[in-house]
Image (cartoon, rainbow, N blue to C red):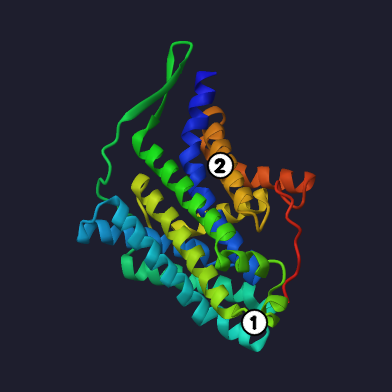
Amino acid sequence: MSVFLQQIINGLSQGGIYSLIAIGWTTVFGIVGVINWTHGEVYMLGAYCGYFITTFLHLPMLPALLLSMALGAVIAMGVDQLGYKPLRKKGVLAGTGFITALGLSQILRYSASAAFTPNPRAYPVLVQQKLITLFSVGGTPITINSLHLIILVGSVLIMTILELFMKKTLTGKAMLAASQDMQTLSLMGVNAERLIKITFAISGALGAAAGFFIGMIYAINPMMGALAGLKGWSCAILGGIGSITGSLIGGVLLGIVENLTAGYISTGYKDAIGFFVMIIVLLVRPSGLMGYKFEEKV
């Protein structure tokens, strides 16, 4: 039992990071109606922003995180401006957006590889790590690394702020309405392009935050966005596209399942098990855990 509980605790911080990626996915898809495959690359570039900020500017964790999120927002808005907005103007986003997103993701990935080299890079130490005992089971202490605890708290705090923004502000409520019917909202005088820009900015900030957190744990490289993007999408589908709470639940579940798989079966199955769980959930409940109803964007 103690080993089982320890694996669950270990999976929570990883799940928080997955949740941030998933929410970035689900906000763009829910409002703009495009599967934004560049999100994994924004996550990767956000990690590199954090690396350069902490390595060369020597900023502490919190200012470096906020600056990385701001740069991630700018990168995501740039992707929309260059890649998706021209398609929206021509009215062909629904037909070609997926292919455009794949092309943009490849351009960003290999441009980053050329600019930063494929060699992994490690963040400087931003937090002194120590083991914190949470409780004991049968005399065996259940612990959490202080760095993982900070990342978990930071992830939850970011998601809580986003949830409050969506539900308590006029812009957030307009974004929720846009996820249901963008055309009707435009007819009511709402600036649809402004909402889309804000959506991409939020998505980019979340992706950059996830990249920053993962950089505090592991070495980063230009190819890191590929698998992370797929995992974020699987978490979003698992929880229910369009639901922030669903993405949170999906991310936490994936993080826990991956750690249980690594602990009890093999680390070789760790990356595959999440997609297996996603398939099982979709077979039982196609709309995901939170029951989002998919609607085609036009």
Q: Earlier in the sequence, mark 1 or mark 2?
A: 1
Disc marking residue 169: none
Q: Residues within 10 Å of mark 2 (few under 14, many from 20)?
A: many
How many numbered marks, from 0 up? 2
The residue under the point 56% across, 82% down is 85
Q: Residues within 10 Å of mark 1 (few under 14, many from 20)?
A: few
Q: Amino acid at mark 2?
A: Val
Across and down, in percent, residue 144 comes to 40, 30
Secondary structure type for disc 1 = loop
Quadrant location, the C terminus:
bottom right
The residue under the point 35% across, 39% down is 147
Quadrant location, the N terminus:
top right
Across and down, in percent, residue 261 comes to 56, 34
Relative to 62, say whether 260 is above or below: above
Residue on which the image places disc 2: 252
Across and down, in percent, residue 191 comes to 59, 80
Residue on which the image places disc 1: 189
Residue 34 in view, yes or no = no
Relative to 285, say whether 181 is above or below: below
The residue under the point 44% across, 11% down is 139
Relative to 162, say whether 93 is above or below: below
Cα separation, mark 1 vs mark 2, equals: 38 Å
Q: Residue furthest top?
A: 138
Q: Are marks 1 and 2 in contact (CB under 8 Å)?
A: no
Q: Amino acid at mark 1?
A: Gly
Between 49 and 225, the one lying in front of the other is: 49
Across and down, in percent, residue 222 comes to 40, 61
Secondary structure type for disc 2 = helix
Which is closer to the viewer, label 1 or label 2?
1
